Image (cartoon, grey):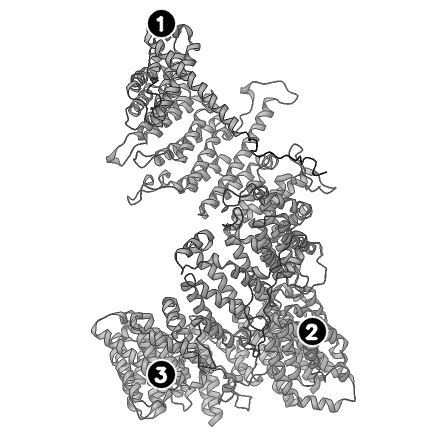
Amino acid sequence: MDAVSPEAVTSEDNKSQMVDLSASQHILVCSLHELGSLVQSLGTSASPLVAEPATGIIEPVLSVLLHPSSSARLSAAWCLRNIAVALPSQLTPLLDRCMTNLIRLKASPEAVSGNSFALAALLGGVHLCPLGIPHVVGKKIFGIAEELLRTASQNSRLSLQRTQSGWLLLGALMTLGPPVAKHHLPKMLLLWRNAFPRSIKELEAEKARGDAFTWQVTLEGRSGALCAMYSFVLHCRELVTEDVTRRLLAPLECALTLLAHIPSILKAYGAHLKACAAMVRLRLYDVMSQLPAEAYEGAYNALLRELVAEFTLTDNPANTTTSLLRAMCHVDDSVILGSWLQETDHKAIEDQLQPNSASGSGALEHDPASLFIRCAAVNSGESTPGPLPLGVAVIDSSVKLYGLVFPRVPYKHRLKMLQHFSGCIKQAKSSRQQAVQMNIFTAVLCALKSLADTKTGFGQLEVRKAAVGLVLDALGSSNPILRCAAGEALGRIAQVIEDSKFIAEMAQYSFDRLKSARDVVTRTGHSLALGCLHRYVGGMGSGQHLNTSVSILLALAQDTTSPIVQVWATHALGLIADSGGPMFRGYVEPTLSLVLSLLLAVPPSNTDVHQCLGKCLAALITTIGPELSGNTGSVATARLYCLVCCAIMQDHPDSLVQAEAIACLQQLHMFAPRHVNLTTVVPHLCSTLNSSHLLLRRAAVACLRQLSQREAKDISALALTLVSETKDSKQGILITETGLEGALFSLLDQETNTKLCSDVHDIIISMLQSLAAEHLTQWFTLVKDVLAAATEFGTPLESPSEDVAKGDGDEEENDDAAATFKAPDVDVTHPSVAPRWPTRVFATDCMRKIITVCECDSTHFDLIQAREIKKTNKKGDYLVLHLSELVRVAFIAATSDSDQLRLAGLATLQDIIGKFAKVPEPEFPGHVILEQFQAQVGAALRPAFSPDTPSDVTAAACEVCSTWIGSGVARDLNDLRRVHQLLVSSLEKLKMGKEKSQLYNESASTMEKLAVLKAWAEVYIVAMNQDDVPTGLPQNADDDFEDFQSGENLLTLVKPELLSLSKHWLAALKDHALLSLPPEFSSQLPSEGGAFYSPETIFSARQHYRKSWAPILYAVALWLNEGGYTTPANEKQDSVAEQPPANMQPEEFDADRFHLLLGICVEALCSPTSIQPLESVTLCLKALAVLLEKQWPRSRIGTEPSLSIEILNVMHRLLITRESPSTQLLVMDVVKQVIKAAQENMAHRKELQSTPANQESTTETDLPILGEGGDTGEIVPGQSIVFATLEVCLCVLTRQIPALNPALPSTGFQTPHRLLKLSDEACLLVSSAMLVMADLPELCSPAGSVNILSTILFLTTGVIREMAPRSADLIAIPSPVATALQAMKTLCSSSLASDDRCADSWVQLLQSALATVLDFAKPDPQQDKPGLDVSTLVLTLSVFIMSCPSEVTRAANLQQPCIEILKEAWQSKDTAIKLKCLQALSSIFQHLDRAIATPFIHAMAPPVMEHMSIFTTHRPHSDIELSIAVESIKILESLIAAAQEHTRIGLISILVPLLISYLLEDSKLPSANKPSKAFHDYALQRLMTFGPQYPEQFRIVMGTTPELRTRLAMAVKANQAAANLQARNAAQARQQSQPTKPSIQLKTDFSNFGS
């Protein structure tokens, strides 16, 4: 390659050398193709081949671009493309090199051509490089292409090359997509318009003044223009609007006109222009096939004339045939056309050996546009595109376009064309007739397929007859592929016509022909015709002919004199069985019997017959279906026949038949798994993996894929039985101790077939999901071996915990540098080949899947539990025990030389951190298990932050950094700084402007910068949540860890960068807000782009912003909340606050930022065009709640009710669309902040109203009424904060408690809510809604509050009713009920209840609420009303009585039921209910309004006082009985305090004797239980307090009964003695706790030793 250089090109003395170079072009082409394929397979691992001067491959390849041979130049260009795709970092430098060379060597035709080829190929490979190229490169190339076209006419020696190269570059540029093409579209439209004559007159003038060379250049230019147009339409669909299409049609119509004049031009200037003219036709057909056929409807006549002439070879003396006929036939028909069509490892050679086929003759030089056009061959995995020869390509393109146009032309034109086809076939002779016939049938099939796809009718009877006549003639053709095409066409015609009469006629015609004819051709053609009829009309459409068809085909299949007839008949029988469905069930037995007999009778040499029998057997198995698992006699016989047939085919020597056997076994296993003997099938499949036949290997892998989904454990065990058998084998895939899984990993390194590798991946993943959790060691060893083999000698690596150097925080860089894994120095004479990087990437992904599989068992992530189980069960295998291996695998992958493997390794590392960050280390309490791997994590991340690392790798590493820092694993500030420094270094990239030269597209820079900002945002979020104690750690953590808590140190690390970070965060959010605008507002986007995106990369930048905006938004909200605002002087200020610009007021500056964040939140949460992930919604809600925590931002929405209403409506929508309880709780947090803002605004307005500035005070009636509702009380939906809040609360309550929805129809099938149990989150949701509702009346005017009070009371009482039914299961009062009572208390004590303007209405509604509670308090089994829990009922009544205005409960019809309920509670045998009743009575008896308290005292005081005497003989034995006794005493004391002076002596005379009777005697005191002693102490304490409180009454009572005095005195003395004893014991204990003097006294004084 080095022989070609710029000097050699420009020298005149090297002509002989050029001749030698021309002779070597074939060697160069092969070498370059192999080199390109090799580098592409290596990926980024091939970087040493480029970077090291000794092995540099780029210079030699670039030198071939100057080769005189076009083939060599094209191959070099494709090789450069492969290098650039493998090494994306080389793409931009290679483009720059080629542009430089093109400009520098612009006088050389070879240099212009070769470098243009290279540029086109490199541009065509950009879509395979996710990071792309800088936008400016596309602009430069467009400029070069324009310059080439402009200067083409200046130098005749270079005209052709410059014209070709200019249009080639423009076409390649279109592959960069709409972001690039739309900027150049106006110029492109102008270039296309100028490339063609605008009228017939101009065309005639061209013909008159041109010469042969001029016409060659002209035709090349026009084919190039059409090629660029084709590339544009193909790759920029979004830009092909109606207007653009209309403007494209003008040059296309000119090109179509030009085609009519081509024959005269060729006649005038020579046949050497034929190739140029053919290229023009090819490009024109390609472009028109990509445009809507309706667009050029007026040109159908001229176009069809050209198309028909093209594929009927009217002007073509060569017998050129299309390559599409095989593709137009059904894929299943390959079995009757010969085994060569099956896929093999040497398909390229097989294709070239076939007659009547252009397959295998593809080459780059046939069409240079294939360098950048995204062809199916390259996309399917082939290394090099192979465009077919020009003559074949033109016919192929014309056939495709004909198929698109045919359904849209009138019936009469269809008839003419079909008749014309028949005439062309009849006129042609011998081999030309076959060529014409093949082309015509391909076009007809393409047209029929389009008719079926567009659901278009075929036409009148004459059209049908013409088509059928054409087809029936071909059924008798001697060419098998023509017969096959004819059968396919007949089936397609029947499908399009959909006429049962026509189907019957065609079937009968074939029946007659098959009965009368004896020749092979007729029998085979009409057999297939029957099969195709059934295939395309289905079993229902051809059911009436099924019996005849099957009987005839069964007879033909037994014609042993003609194996070909047997093949076609059996194939047709299989088609009928496949399409017949249940209707074919009655013919299964005879057909199956025939298949078995033929398998036994037909010689193995007739491979095609056996293969067709296999296909037929597969169709029969599908027809029987699940019945095969039955045990009836006929089914058992059929199953046995199937198994015998499979066994016969397995023993066949041909690989195709063996593959059919495996496919049949696979189907049998699907329907009857119990009857397929895996002990023989699995070993056979494993041995088949070593087959030299691709088809057989694919069949075996496909079968294993199905088996692994159901029988993974069995096939793994059966494969291990082959270990001893394969040990002696020296080649192929070996089943070793790693089992089938290891063999499959080895297979991945040997296979190149995409489908086969995909199936192998599926097998491994299925086996992993089934077996990995139980066999972790085996799987870890397997994955570890695959990754460890990447080292020099393929030997296992040492454990990272042994090789990672550990040091202090001052030497963290040395720590990371030392944290590498080294292979031991072992002499290896035959080093093994390392697995390919795709295999290693897949192995790393398998490790991640293993972690996911283990999530179902928490023991895998609990070291303490795993070790305990391991001790008792030696087979116990848990993920946490393999943590060091996990980290090692992640480290190996993250530090590899393959970018894809690095990404997989970083993703694995992030999974490890996420799963094990909170797992405690049992040997070191307070520490976590991941702490020992801090150096490894730092070492794995450091390479990703080097300057030459691709942006996607750095972005992934930033995410891992933030996860690691936020996990709280790092205990020490120095440990934390190791990774923190990496993030600090990444901040430098934010300071680089957008104009900096770069290797990748601007969107890659956007991705990287946003990843850095997102990582910092996540770290800041964790730092701000420093009060959250890391979960999963034991409570007895070390003091040093408690002091750290990960938050304070984090904040000190973040603060130095916070000011610049906040600016970048806000800039990124502004960008995101602009990019989120709908398309109709695109004109508002800044022309210069944003802070982190350029205007050319808007499309690709949006996805990066979508991934990053949510954490950044939350971080900015936290920052603003902590002092980022500049406006409120009374709030916390921080040095991180950003100062506003000089031209903005602080409040305006803050308002802009606040509305930016608020707008992003609202847009993200309510946008119907996007579905945000739950994580983004969560962060957005948190940000919104934090944003509204401070008073100033709340004042912004408080003064704008429409803003508050919008937020509440968005929250309502979220409640409806999001089921997550945590999300709904966050929604309620935001709602609370909005209500708080409204309350503060209301308070502020009232304050302003109460003290109007510079005005005299006014009376209340003169002031305007504040609050929603005004004078009328009307709450207007859509304009009311209160209404919007009620919507939210109602949604929460009815979602959690459906019975509260009065509109819910009762079907009788719903489970009553009282029988269900709410989760903790649901209880919190209900409680939040209740508290919010209770505050709503305060936001209304008096009249408005009345309007909403009934709704609030209905919902509040409904919650109490549904959540606290009378049931033995209800032990404690649920939290929602407690909150409902709190809300009820708030409502009852509201100032509005005593406001003269609405007091009457409030009293009536509160009375109604109390009456409602009293109503559903009574159980009614007949109406399925369980009543209300008594404890809850007592508390509810207590709230009403104590909190409501006295008018509410003074009504006799409410007061008396309340008393009755309290009596019932007091009489209850449940001591807890008694206690609740006493507590309620204690409050009621002390009510300030004696008119309310007196009836309750009269009714309830006597029974309580009577009950107190019981404690004299039956002392309390439990805490609750003690509480009842104490509450009783308190009630009596409250009655004494409330009694009048003259009546008090009576109550005291009751209480004092009772208290004294509660005192224990001295002898009984030591043996009394704890409650009894406590009761004694309490009674004595109350007596000691009561005496001084009421001295006279106390003295009178004590004087009347001397025994009382004596007993009290004894108790006091005993209490005093106990107190003295306790004091002595305490003093003695303090004395004993003092340190004692040492028993051995030192004689030497050491006090001065230190000096």
Q: Give the residue displayed 42% in from the left and 86% down from the top.
A: 338
Residue 635 position, x and y percent, is 24, 74
Q: Secondary structure at mark 2?
A: loop
Q: CA distance from mark 2 to mark 3?
A: 56 Å
Q: Secondary structure at mark 1?
A: helix
Q: CA distance from mark 1 to mark 2?
A: 115 Å
What amino acid is found at the position of numbered circle 3 in the picture? Cys
Foreground residue, 1210 or 1104?
Answer: 1104
Residue at the disc numbered 2 = 52
Residue at the disc numbered 3 = 612
Foreground residue, 1019 or 1084?
Answer: 1019
Neighbour tally class for label 1: few under 14, some 14-19, many 20 plus, Cα within 10 Å? few
Mark 1 vs mark 2: which is more N-terminal? 2
Mark 3 vs mark 1: which is more N-terminal? 3
Neighbour tally class for label 3: few under 14, some 14-19, many 20 plus, Cα within 10 Å? many
What amino acid is found at the position of numbered circle 1 in the picture? Gly
Q: Taking 1596 as reference, is 471 above or below it?
A: below
What amino acid is found at the position of numbered circle 2 in the picture? Glu
Foreground residue, 378 or 162?
Answer: 378
Left or right of 1192, for residue 868: left
Residue 1010 position, x and y percent, is 63, 54
Residue lying farthest bottom?
430
Q: Quadrant of residue 565?
A: bottom left
Q: Quadrant of residue 679?
A: bottom left
Q: Say whether residue 482 is visible.
A: yes
Mark 2 vs mark 3: which is more N-terminal? 2
Q: CA distance from mark 3 to mark 1?
A: 122 Å
Residue 505 position, x and y percent, is 31, 81
Residue at the disc numbered 1 = 1599
Labels 3 & 1 near each other (Cβ < 8 A): no
Q: Taking 868 as reference, is 336 above or below it?
A: below
Q: Give the residue displayed 69% in from the left and 73% down from the top.
A: 52
